[in-house]
Image (cartoon, helix red, strand yellow):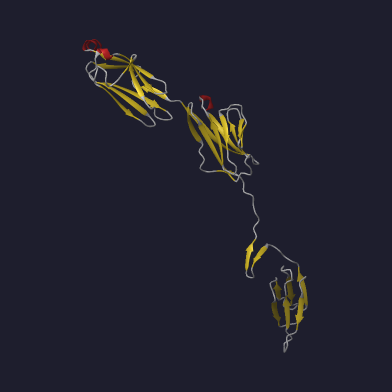
Amino acid sequence: MASLTWQRPRGSSEGKRRHLARSSDDGRAGAYKVKSPSSGMMAVSAGGGPLEVDAAYPLADVTEMPHINFIRFRGLGDSLLEEEEEEVEEVPYFDASMSSTYTAYLGKTATLTCVVHAARSDKSVSWIRGRDLRILTVGGYTYTTDLRFEALHQKASSEWTLRIKSVQLRDQGSYECQITTKPIRTFNVFLKVVEPTVEVIGAPDIYVNTASMINLTCVVNHAPYPPEAITWFHGNQTISYTSKRGGVSVVEERGETTTSILLLQNARASDSGAFTCQPEGMESAQVTLHVLDGRWLENNV
């Protein structure tokens, strides 16, 4: 309980009174008011005393004010005070850098990653398939009998991954990463499944003149990686650089799109027929070559 002491200064001729207010022993602030009925002048001590107030008139009354604690402070030594802030629980949220589209190659593995910060538990994030709203994973657990689907998550990690092995065309579509909050938060991604394609430009039929240069171009698109080898066939025979025909060359360019260009010099009638482009481990593509002589041109021009 705060103490209040009145003292008359020694040698005072003006009848001054001295008000001494001290804070309580427990360190909590007390507040006191000294008020003059004639002028309404007031002096207040909010603790931390002693505080001395000189008044040049008789003081009518002293009123103890109630303890006011608008902001709680924590003392660090005698002179440093810090405001004690209330802790606010952080709401889980998706990482802004997450991708909303993924591409997977037919027969390969697709990996969909959801990044969630401030998740309340490892089981608070799920993956759901959009076309049938089927729950695929919860936390690090898989909830489907399709063994191609697998949940990947390490404890305390911010990443929840859905892995799909041996991707099929029917796996294409939307998938939803869901955070178990109120209300539920979701992030939608779209998985595109691409099938490698092989084609010969100009197929199904290409016409060339006798004695001209034969140029057959095979293009491989949407392959997860460039084929290790591309083989050309004429009928059932493999075309090689050492064949008796001679004048054979192949130019290849590898990358996201791989091309193989077969060049045959001095076209002749025996070159007519089916040519097949066969990338290793992929479907083949075919074209039929027609070598024309002058008489055919005269009759068809």
Quadrant the C terminus occupies: top left
- Which is more toward the observer, 159 or 181? 159
Which of the 4 image quarters holds residue 237? top left
Which of the 4 image quarters holds residue 7? bottom right
Residue 259 percent location from the top left of the image: 34, 27
Q: Is residue 197 left or right of residue 20?
A: left
Count of number-bearing discs:
0
- Which is more toward the observer, 59 or 159? 159
Q: Is residue 137 visible?
A: yes
Q: Is residue 13 visible?
A: no
- Which is more toward the observer, 129 or 146? 146
- Identified at 72% across, 81% down, the residue is 18
- Identified at 70% across, 73% down, the residue is 44
Residue 233 percent location from the top left of the image: 33, 17
Residue 8 percent location from the top left of the image: 75, 84
Above or below residue 64? Residue 207 is above
Above or below residue 115? Residue 108 is above
- Which is more toward the observer, 158 or 212? 158
- Identified at 73% across, 73% down, the residue is 33
Quadrant the N terminus occupies: bottom right
Which of the 4 image quarters holds residue 64? bottom right
Above or below residue 70? Residue 243 is above
Q: In this view, does 23 lie to the left or right of 165?
A: right
